[in-house]
Amino acid sequence: MLADLREDENYYNCRITPQGVYELGIADSRSRNIFFVSLCRNSGISARIEPATSRPQYFKNGKWVDVYLQPEIAPAHLSMANLTLQNVKENIIKPTYTANYSLAYFNNGEFHTLDYEGNPAVANLPYTLKLNAGYYRLLVGSRANDGSVFVHTEYFELKENTNQTADIRIPTTEGKLPVKGIIDMNTVVMTKDGSKASLKELSKGKGLVLCFLDPGKEPSKHILQDFPAVQAEFEQWGGGVLFMIPDDKETKPFDASAFKGLPSNTVWGSDLQHELLKSATNALQIKFQDNFPLTIYLSSNGGILFSSAGYRIGTGTDVLTVIQKERKSYRI
């Protein structure tokens, strides 16, 4: 036994360092597994924690081998199957793992979510996973503008030595889109290239995503890394994307060109004395205390159909969901 197993004494479920496990001689199962991987690597044996199942593995004869440490019992026969997850044409956005859907495996009386977040193997649908045969749950969700979430749940059995498929179909939100406020689309802004343009011109008659940023803060940097994931969808839509930086938030080190993969219809602007930001917060009737980024979606006539302030995962996807619903509501 690598260490005395104590599952109830790591209250916050923090990972104990391998050195800590060695010196204490006790660990929870998660820290013990990491300790095992560390021992293997220190001995020149390739080892890892399998990212989806969190199962410790070592590399032998060209393949990864699962490790079962006491008190676990290795199955006498590990049956496998292939599952192909695929997009459906009705989805206006590209579904991403964790943000839009997740897959869980039923074991020992409960479902365990497979952790594929950030895994390049699942970056683009369709893709095929080699999984243990068994019972699975597929969750697909969509968040409405008011914060409510619509979820489709599917349960299925993955049978041994089979090739099965599952559709990722994002559920549509119900009800009409509420207008949270109105901004004058004739408002003129100063763009970073020194020219001027009205919000109406930037919307190209289809709508405008307007995002106020503080480029020196992490939440604003995060949203600039979020939009490239839905670049193609925004370009296909054809409206405008405007990133505005209040003039007192501009810094010399900030370089907009450093953020790659933004939609080609992106425009950068400078918000002098917070004039446009004030118009937006007044229209929304909110008190805004530098909780950047503030992201809103304006219809072609200036109605605010979406707003989000501060850190939020998947903002680009949420905006596209609203755009899709607007198009269906008005048969655009």
Image (tube, rainbow, N blue to C red):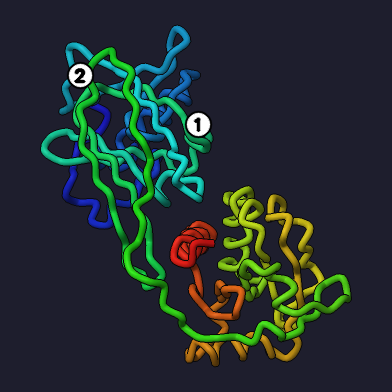
> Between tags 1 and 2, which lies in front?
1
Residue 244's place in the image compared with 12, above or below, is below
Residue 28's place in the image compared with 47, above or below, is below
Q: Which residue type carries mark 1?
A: Ala
| Pointer 2 local density, CA inside 10 Å: few below 14, some 14–19, many at least 20 | few
Residue visible at 40% across and 20% down in the picture: 58
Give the side of residue 320 with respect to residue 203, left or right.
left
Q: Position of residue 231 (x, y in %)?
A: 63, 51
Residue visible at 35% across and 61% down in the picture: 173
Please tell me which residue lies in front, 124 or 310: 124
Mark closer to the chain start, 1 or 2: 2
Give the side of residue 35 with respect to residue 126, left or right.
left
Q: Residue furthest front?
A: 331
Q: Position of residue 185 (x, y in %)?
A: 67, 82
Q: Quadrant of residue 303?
A: bottom right
If the image is split into quadrants, where does the N terminus sit? Answer: top left
Is the Cβ of the residue at disc 1 closer than 8 Å to that at disc 2? no
Residue 185's place in the image compared with 316, above or below, is below
Q: Residue furthest left?
A: 109
- Look at the image and tell me whether residue 175 can be seen: yes
Residue visible at 82% across and 72% down in the picture: 192
- Look at the image and tell me whether residue 312 can be seen: no
Task: Say the numbered circle drawn on residue 74.
Answer: 2
Q: Position of residue 90 (x, y in %)?
A: 44, 45
If the image is split into quadrants, where does the C terminus sit? Answer: bottom right
Residue visible at 73% across and 91% down in the picture: 273
Secondary structure beneath dot 1 equals helix
Number of dots carrying numbers: 2
Q: Which residue type carries mark 2?
A: Ala
Task: Say the numbered circle drawn on residue 121.
Answer: 1
